[in-house]
Image (tube, grey):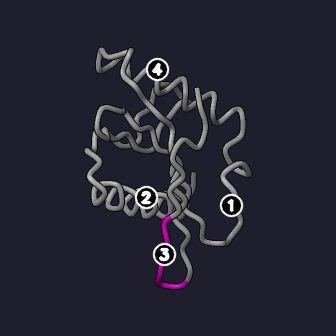
Amino acid sequence: MSENRRSKGSFGEDKACDYLTGLGYKFLTRNFHYSRYAEIDLVFQYKDEIVFVEVKTDYTGQFGEAAAWINQRKIKNIILASKGFLRKIDNFDAPCRFDAIIVHVTNNTFTIEHIENAFYA
């Protein structure tokens, strides 16, 4: 991954963290890697749920609807990583959900689109 692309992704993850923390979510970890391809951008706790969050930073308007960029392979890898995370915290039965956040960036401003339950395991 290019440094510029990584920097843009980090910007989006930073903004998503700030947004969710502001809503009362408790930050647990960022960029949790379970394998080479199974990774979760952000993990939070909200009330009694573990929330796994996929973040996309959109500088071009290319992402559109979540369905356009969360394909079956991506979902499979996120679910695999989520199982690894639940094993790591020794709470495999924790209620959890999968959210998506798109950070739309235009010029020097941004908006956040938060999709709760973007997909199901």
| Rendered location of residue 111, percent (x, y) | 49, 72
The span from disc 4 to disc 3 (Cα, nearest Å) is: 32 Å
Q: Secondary structure at mark 4?
A: helix
- Crowdedness of circle 2 by 10 Å Cα count: few (<14), some, many (20+)? some
| Tag 1 residue | 63
In the image: residue 25, left or right of residue 58? left
Task: State which tag comes first along the sequence, 4 or 3.
Answer: 4
Tell me which label, 3 or 2, sits earlier in the chain.
2
The image shows residue 96 at horizontal and vertical percentages of 43, 30
Q: Is residue 7 left or right of residue 72?
A: left
Q: Is residue 51 magenta?
A: no
- Return the residue at label 3: 110
Horizontal side of 119 relative to 68 (left or right) equals: left
Where residue 77 appears, as percent x and y from the top left, is 59, 29
Q: Which residue is mark 2?
A: 10
Identify which residue is drawn at 29% across, 48% down.
Answer: 25
Image quadrant of residue 29?
top left
Q: CA distance from mark 3 to mark 2?
A: 14 Å
Q: Where does the C terminus fall, quadrant-wise?
A: top right
Residue numbers of the magenta segment: 107-112
Q: Which is more toward the observer, 28 or 30?
A: 28
